[in-house]
Amino acid sequence: MDRREAIFKVATLMGVTLSAPLISGLVYGQGNTLLAIPDGYISPLANDNQQKMIAEIAELIIPTTKTPGAKAAKVPEFINVLITDCYPEQDQKRFFSGLDNLDEAAKKAYGKGFLAATKAQQTELLKKAEADTRALRAKQPSAPAPFFQMIKEMTVTGYFTSEIGATKALNYIAVPGAYRPCEPMKPGQKTWAT
Amino acid sequence: MNLNLKAQAQNTYDAIVIGSGVSGGWAAKELTEKGLKTLMLERGHKLEHVKDYTSAMKDPWEFKYRGRITQKQRESHPYISRDYPYNEYNESYWIKDIDSPYTEKKRFDWFRGNIVGGKSIMWGRQSYRLSDIDFEANLKEGIATDWPIRYKDIAPWYDYVEKYVGISGQAEGLPQLPDGQFLPPMEFNCIEKSVKKVVEGKFPGRKITMGRVANLTKPLNGRASCQYRNLCSRGCPYGAYFSTQSSTLPAAVKTGNLTLRPDSIVNSLIYDEKKGKTTGVRVIDSNTGQMTEYYAKIIFVNASALSSTWILMNSTSNRFPNGFGNASGQLGHNLMDHHFRTGASGETDDFADQYYFGRRANGIYVPRYRNIGNDKRDYVRGFGYQGSGSRDGWQRAVAEMGFGADFKEAMTKPGKWKMGLGGFGECLPYYENKITLNKDVKDKWGQPTLTFDAEFKENEMKMRKDMANDAAEMLEAAGLKNVKTYDAGSYPGLAIHEMGTARMGRDPKTSVLNAFNQVHEAPNVFVTDGACMTSASCVNPSLTYMALTARAVDHAVKELKKNNI
């Protein structure tokens, strides 16, 4: 059901007559104050290696399975936008040095950079990064979020709020129109996206 | 001279309402429906119902930052960016802090709207009545000053506004939380039903009721009922919750008696020393900076609690050298807010095969039970809980260990049922909790600003212990697992229930307003927003402002007809 159809349906259900200008306002009156993420956006703060690492790590966190993964959902673009516009400088520095450190760790362990490593090697490196993050958080709960925590948070948020994540991996209904508080789960029931 | 007279006539109305939020909208509706030509002034920008709710029908992925604010916004909104109500979805509805700065002797989170409709667009919509337990508390305990009204004075006005607003809720017959004119309540989900049953059985005097909320569960006056999207604070295209735009403004416009002027910052009230009377207001156009005077017989000050008091403080004259109507010296004092952000949560393995459909824009409510009847604590007053149950969603992925294919698949399945209870506690009216006029720091338009000096004290701190422990006790009794208390700390202002600073009272020597919200010393000036509150109760206050406003307008127009004002 598209947005226009959803509005008509709900309006009819409620016995409320919405005027034509109101409907067009709802469907088309989106204004220009909010902008979607530009396709292929790359942060001016990221070098080429960092940029590619962001995409690979996001896809390792949320890979393509039965449903498309992080890359298809444009999560790398989202991370680039977020780190550029929404984080203070010290967080940006920690994020990008975290990427560089991971690259260094790959060189030390496997004699090649993160991007040249195999999937299995990359996965091992991320597992270690996650374990280190856990250990640090346990020791210093109020410490600023380490790199792995930052990229994981951005990846899962970016993915599950993307059109692919919300509508394919999860179940999204823009206008429920009703509240049914308890009902048996359907086979294969997915989490509500919102 | 002729030109001046003409301009003066053009700028003269029967009544002026300062502010277009919850209480200003009600003042405008009531005044215009009683036949008064009314000018409603709003400092914020135009926000047309439905058409201007530009984010309301957007899907999550249509937001560049998925709800987050940017570093630039943090810099331009240094105070309100400290908490969640200011976000990408409705960022244009809020005031730009750096244009209107304030000074914090102690931290105060001041959330100010900057739109027609004010915070009636972003409000939490929980709507409860005060009771005589609230109205009598100051007198019985010898705290601050006595309310000049009792429940019987306001009860018919609660009825009156509720019928028009549309409040969904369940009647419970509790003396501490009087019932109202309710639309059918929303429904409890599995975990809430289960916790309710146990708590009401094991804890006599405690009740879990459905939140009383200004969201329609049935169409009303051409407004559709709630669509269970839970996106209220973006503005509702269905008009399904009470806001100025959905409810009071259309009624006022329909009379043909309303003039609405956005972008109009009220600088001060005009006091005519010769006439010995307040004759109008001075208004700064926020775009041009130009000052214009408007005149009326009656003025309703509904600028939101602290902005209303700011206007009174900034309105000095020979008659009122220390602030308008401030012979008592109480103006700016007795600042209150609810303290909150403490409670408990727990989870269960039960109901694993059950889920819900739709997003209920409401939670459950536990009415106050402390210091009621024979219950006596080591603090006075009490608290209520707001809470809700739900199944964990994908958001748990942020904190849970793991990544990759299995992790992704697990996150697409609903998680555990969880339930939380968060207390909202009454704060006492302390004289020393105050705002003062600061002439050293000016706003963008060259006006003085406010300095905040307020804190929660011992009574509130003791109450917070109960707020956390009682919540955990109830959830544990209900069989929930992994029950944890929390106290995230509470600063005045964060609950956005700021109240007091121009309190009502019986005696002009100890209060600013009388029993009808009239300034004791200026009977044609009324203040009917949060500024008027003599004590805070523990319930969400907006419904009370609506009832007091309708009651005050009724009184004002009767007095006007008798030529008393």
Image (cartoon, rainbow, N blue to C red):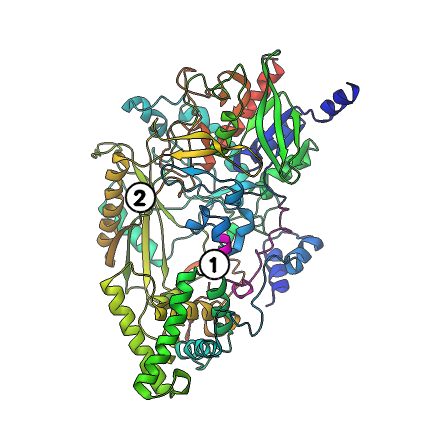
Kindly identify the residue that appears in the image at 43 percent across and 41 percent down.
Answer: B496
Name the residue nearer the viewer: B227 or B440: B440
Which of the labelled discs sits on residue B68, or is there none? 1
Does residue B48 belong to the magenta stretch? yes
Camera sees residue A185: no
Going from N to C along the chain, the mark reached first, 1 or 2, is 1
Q: Is residue B21 above or below residue A127?
A: above
Instruction: Specify whether disc 1 shares its chain with disc 2.
Output: yes
Q: Is residue A88 above or below residue A100?
A: above
Image position of B331 (left or right of A145)? right
Kindly identify the residue that appears in the image at 38 percent across and 86 percent down.
Answer: A119
Chain ID, mark 1: B
Chain ID, mark 2: B
Does residue A1 belong to the magenta stretch? no
Q: Mark 2: give few (<14), some (14-19) or many (20+) Cα within 10 Å.
A: some
Image position of B10 (left or right of B284)? right
Q: Of helix, strand and loop, which one carries label 2?
A: loop
Q: Is residue B488 above or below residue A58?
A: above
Residue A114, horizontal then vertical, whole percent? 39, 83
Q: Mark 1: give few (<14), some (14-19) or many (20+) Cα within 10 Å.
A: some
Residue of label 2: B207
Which of the 4 image quadrants contains residue B9?
A: top right
Q: Of helix, strand and loop, which one carries label 1?
A: loop
Which of the labelled discs sits on residue B523, or is there none? none
Residue A34, horizontal then vertical, whole percent? 58, 59
| Image: magenta residue range | B47-73
Q: Nearer the viewer, mark 1 or mark 2?
A: 1
Name the residue nearer the viewer: B250 or B209: B250
Q: Amino acid at mark 2?
A: Lys
Q: Amino acid at mark 1?
A: Arg
